[in-house]
Amino acid sequence: MKQSRRELVRTIAVVAVIWVVILVAVARWQGRGERAGAGRRPELMHYPGTEAVEEQHSANLGFRKYWFTLNEDYPSKSVYYFYRNELEPKGWTPLHRGEPRWVRQVAKKESRDVFQAVWGSPDNLFQIQLDMMSVVKPVREGEPLSGEEREPGIEVFVTLQRSLHPGLIMQPKAPTGRPGVEVEPGE
């Protein structure tokens, strides 16, 4: 019994060491590819006036993010138009259908109007996600509700990250002809 337990622990330790070696090798291989230009992380553009805003980043998780409060009234889409006009001419593809719109998310004490847009990079390896939020609180000057009060400004979050699965957003290729038997309709 003791010997089988010892063998099991030894086997688990060997597998763990092999797994760590594989992870280190893959990380070095990915880093070499990025330095050589393949899969190079694109630049995270900042909305005009936010260039000095500090970014949050994680090399391991593969994202860079910054956020700010836009001093415009709801339902402004100026940040969306900025990113659309900067990204799409450079080959970034919108991953949303049509033009995104503001959507209300209702909660008990406050509601949020949210806006989201996502673009995929030309090589389908990265995506930029734009999230905007405006908070609304109901005003009770007696029962029932007499209106709502909106917090000033719009919270904006911009994230550059690796695509979760590049195959999900890759453009479908044109079908190729496959050899087969042609069947002609009967007369």
Image: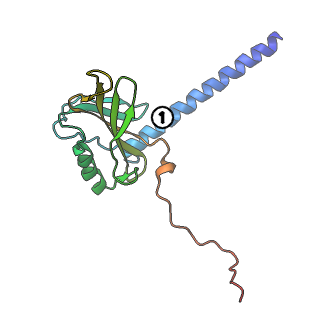
Q: Quadrant of residue 157?
A: top left
Q: Amino acid at mark 1?
A: Ala
Up-down: is 171 above or below 19?
below
Q: Residue furthest bottom?
A: 187
**Quadrant, the N terminus:** top right
How crowded pointer 1 is (Cα within 10 Å; few <14, some 14-19, many 20+) is rated as few
Up-down: is 186 above or below 21?
below
Q: Quadrant of residue 184?
A: bottom right
- The residue drawn where x is 28% and y is 22% is 140
Q: In the image, 57: left or right of 174?
A: left
71 or 39: nearer the eye?
A: 71
Q: Residue furthest left?
A: 49
What is the basis of the colouring in this image? rainbow
The residue pinned by badge 1 equals 27
What element does badge 1 sit on?
Answer: helix
90 or 97: nearer the eye?
A: 97
Q: Residue furthest right?
A: 1
Q: Quadrant of residue 181?
A: bottom right
Residue 90 is situated, as x and y percent measured from the top left of the image, at 29, 55
Give the mark count. Answer: 1
3 or 92: nearer the eye?
A: 92
Residue 125 is situated, as x and y percent measured from the top left of the image, at 43, 46
Q: Residue furthest top?
A: 2
- The residue drawn where x is 24% and y is 49% is 81
- The residue drawn where x is 24% and y is 52% is 85
5 or 76: nearer the eye?
A: 76
Q: In the image, 105: left or right of 186?
A: left
Residue 48 is situated, as x and y percent measured from the top left of the image, at 17, 40
Up-down: is 132 above or below 186?
above
**Quadrant, the C terminus:** bottom right
Residue 37 is situated, as x and y percent measured from the top left of the image, at 37, 47
Q: In the image, 153: left or right of 101?
A: left
